[in-house]
């Protein structure tokens, strides 16, 4: 499953970020693989807004398609 497929309100963790450049950018924002995240909002045809602790980050839909995730309980 990719980040683009996650629904609003679902908790998930990142399994794999395919592109090394994207992985570096995510690490700069404090998002690493296996980090627990929440899908705060999905703008129709727009970005996916994820939340970790008190930080919200908007990730473009095309970028979200390259990030593999696993749903959490």
Image (cartoon, rainbow, N blue to C red):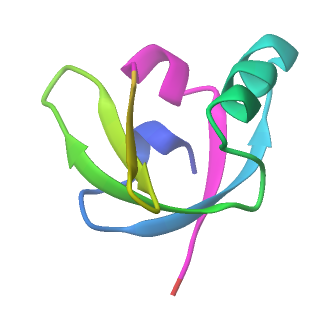
| Residue that appears at 46% across and 62% down | 53
Quadrant of the rendered image containing residue 61: top left
Left or right relative to 49: residue 25 = right
Range covered by the magenta-colored residues = 60-72
Total count of labels: 0
The relative height of residue 57 versus residue 9 in the rendered view (above or below) is above
| Relative horizontal placement of residue 38, taking residue 26 as reference (left or right) | left
Q: Is 56 drawn above or below residue 57 in the view shown?
A: below
Task: Please provide percent x and percent y for residue 56.
Answer: 36, 43
Using residue 8 as the reference point, say whether residue 51 is left or right of it.
right
Give me the residue at 27% from left, 54% from top. Answer: 40
Return the residue nearer the eye: 59 or 53. Answer: 53
Residue that protrudes farthest toward the bottom in the picture: 73
Side of 62 relative to 14 (left or right): left
Q: Position of residue 43 (x, y in %)?
A: 15, 32
Answer with the quarter of the image where residue 45 lies: top left
Residue 60, position as x, y percentages in the image: 39, 19
Residue 62 part of the magenta-drawn span: yes
Q: Nearer the viewer, residue 31 or 64?
A: 31
Where residue 18 sits: x, y (%)?
80, 27
């Amino acid at each position: 499953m990719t980040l683009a497929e996650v629904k609003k309100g679902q908790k998930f963790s990142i399994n794999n970020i395919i592109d090394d450049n994207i992985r570096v950018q995510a690490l700069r924002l404090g998002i690493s693989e296996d980090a627990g995240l929440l899908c705060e909002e999905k703008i129709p045809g727009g970005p996916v807004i994820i939340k970790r602790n008190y930080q919200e980050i908007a990730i473009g839909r095309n970028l979200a398609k390259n990030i593999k995730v696993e749903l959490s309980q």
